[in-house]
Image: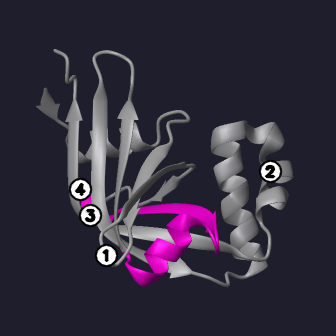
Amino acid sequence: MTEMNSEEVMNFLNLGTMTAKVSTATLDGIPHVAPVWFVIDYDPLSNNNNDLTVIFTTFHNSVKARHLISNPRVCLCVDDQKPPFSFTIISGIAEIDQEPKYDELFSLTSRLAERYMGKENAEKYGKRNAVKGECIIKIKPTKIIAQKDVSD
């Protein structure tokens, strides 16, 4: 097992259609984990992974949204389930936009759809998911653990 460098982390997080498993909790600490489509925003000139932002959407009354509104601490895991296995765990604080402007929401949902459903379906799924009540979640990392070649 080897720790990933900054470039490897970015390449890994942008690879294919792996989902992030997002972990949230109530104020009482009751946990919840759910898979989400996500994208990464980052400065390609930065060598600091803490400069990245993980972005996804969720509906305002979902368990994730309710938890993050009351307790913005969050952790997510992205893992490659094929040997030799790799993973990235990101802990951070979520910023929740509960009423995003339509243009911003549609741009993001289309970007998510392009990654997960292909360019030919981006607009269709972007429109389907850019609805009133959809929140934009942005996570700024406070800690990143990233390992590659776990089984080697």
- Can residue 42 be seen at all in this image of the molecule? yes
Camera-near label (3 vs 4) is: 3
Label 2: which residue? 125
Identify residue type, mark 3.
Asn
119 lies left or right of 116: right
Identify residue type, mark 4.
Asn
Marks 4 and 1, how far apart at CA: 36 Å
Identify residue type, mark 1.
Asp
Label 1: which residue? 28
* Quadrant containing the N terminus in the rendered view: top left
Q: Which residues are magenta?
A: 48-72
Marks 1 and 2, how far apart at CA: 35 Å
Name the residue: 75% across, 66% down.
106
Label 4: which residue? 47
- Can residue 46 be seen at all in this image of the molecule? no
* Quadrant containing the C terminus in the rendered view: top left
